[in-house]
Amino acid sequence: MRATTMCLVAAAALCVYGARPARAQQGATAAAPWQTLEEMPEARWEMASAMVGGTLYLFGGYGAGVQSSRHVDAFEVEDNAWRRLAELPSAITHMNAVADGRSVWLAGGFKDGYPGHAIDEVWRYDIDDDRFVAAPPLPEPRAGGGLALVGRSLHYIGGLMSDRDTDSSDHWVLDLEGSGNWTNAAPMPAPRNQFGTISRDGRIYLTGGQLGHDSRNGKPGLDQTRVDIYDPLTDSWSAGPDLPRPHSHAEGSTLLSAGRIFVIGGRSETRNESTIWVLPREGEWSLFAELPQSLTAPAAGMLDGLLVVAGGAPSGSTPHAMVWARRVEPGRDYP
C-alpha cells in the first residue's frame, strides 16, 4: 500500500510520512472528527450502495430535480478518488445492493423518471468485467424492499407493490447455486418498505422502515421503530430491539462492522436525521455520533475502521455531493 493512501485511511490521525493526496480536503481533529473527502461526481440520494475491497460502489438513485439516474460510481477510499463505471441498464431508484465476492446483486426498484414504476428486474454487477448480467427476476414487481445474502441464498423481503402504496409481506429466496428459481420463505411479520437490511451471524435484520408511500408521505405514523430478525435455519422471525425513534430511508447507509449494526442518517417522520445509531450483539441501540449535517438516504461504507458517508439529501429532495469520513473504534466510540 502506498504511503499516501495509508495516510488517508488513518483519516483522523496526522500523516507522519508521504504527502496527502492532492485532492483530499479538510482534515479531522479531536474536536471535529469528520474529514471532508473528494466530492461525488454528481449530487445523488436514494442510491443503492456496497463496499467491496476498499471501494464504495453507488448505483442509480435520484439526482437534482428528483431525476432518476443510470450512473454507477466507485469511490476508491485509499486514493480519495472517484471513477465512473458502466451505466445501469435503466434509471432505477429504491433498490438495494448486496456484495457477493467480486459481484454486487441488485433487485427491484422504481424504474425510469419520477415517480417511476416498480420492476421485477434482478441484476448482478460483475466488478472485474464492469458489466451487468441479468438474473432470474423477482416473482412480482417490487420496490423499496430489503436485499440480503446469507450463505449462497439471496433474500428479497417486503417492499412496495406495483401501486407504489401497498406494502408486501412476501419473502423470496434465490439459491445462487440451485435451480435459478425464487422460492417462498416465512413472510415478513410487519409489511413495510424503505427499511435497513443487514446480515449478522447468519441472520437477517430489518431496521425501521415506513408504511405505504404515495398516499402517506408527510402523515403521522409513517416511519417505524420496529426491528425484525429472520433466522434461515428455522425459517422464522423474532423481534429485535426497537430503534430509539421512528426511522426510514437509510437503506444504503445501514452496515455491519466489528459485529455491530450501524444505521446512519435517514429520516424520522418529516425530519431528516443526523444520528448514527449502533446495535451491538447484546443490548440496545445507542447513539454513536452525529453527522455534520442531517441527511436522508445517503450511502455509507466502512473500511478498516474508517466510516465513509456519501451523498444524501440535506433538505427535502435536493441532494448534495459531499463525502465525509471519520475513524470508528469499538470500545472507545461505542459499546
Image (cartoon, helix red, strand yellow):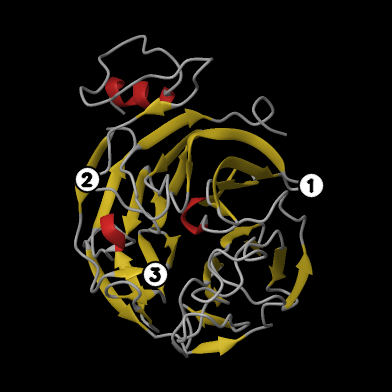
Identify the mark nearer the N-term, 2 or 1. 2
Q: Is residue 67 left or right of residue 324?
A: left
Q: With respect to residue 171, does 10 lie above or below?
A: above
Q: Which residue is mark 2?
A: 41
Q: Secondary structure at mark 3?
A: strand
* Residue 58: percent from left, percent from top: 33, 54
Q: Which residue is mark 3?
A: 106
Q: Is residue 142 left or right of residue 228?
A: left
Q: Secondary structure at mark 2?
A: loop
What's under tag 2, amino acid-wise?
Answer: Pro
Q: Residue furthest top?
A: 16
Identify the mark nearer the N-term, 3 or 1. 3
Q: With respect to residue 275, does 208 lie above or below?
A: below
* Residue 37: percent from left, percent from top: 33, 31
**CA separation in Å, label 3 and label 1:** 31 Å
Q: Is residue 75 left or right of residue 201?
A: left
Task: Say which of marks 3 and 2 sits in front.
Answer: 2
* Residue 65: percent from left, percent from top: 27, 59
Q: Nearer the viewer, residue 102 or 89?
A: 89
Q: Residue at x 62, y 56 (%)?
A: 247
Q: Which quarter of the rendering shows the N terminus?
A: top left
**CA separation in Å, label 2 and label 1:** 39 Å
The disc label shown at residue 282, or none = 1
What's under tag 1, amino acid-wise?
Answer: Glu
Identify the mark nearer the N-term, 3 or 2. 2
What's under tag 3, amino acid-wise?
Answer: Leu
Q: Residue at x 31, y 66 (%)?
A: 125
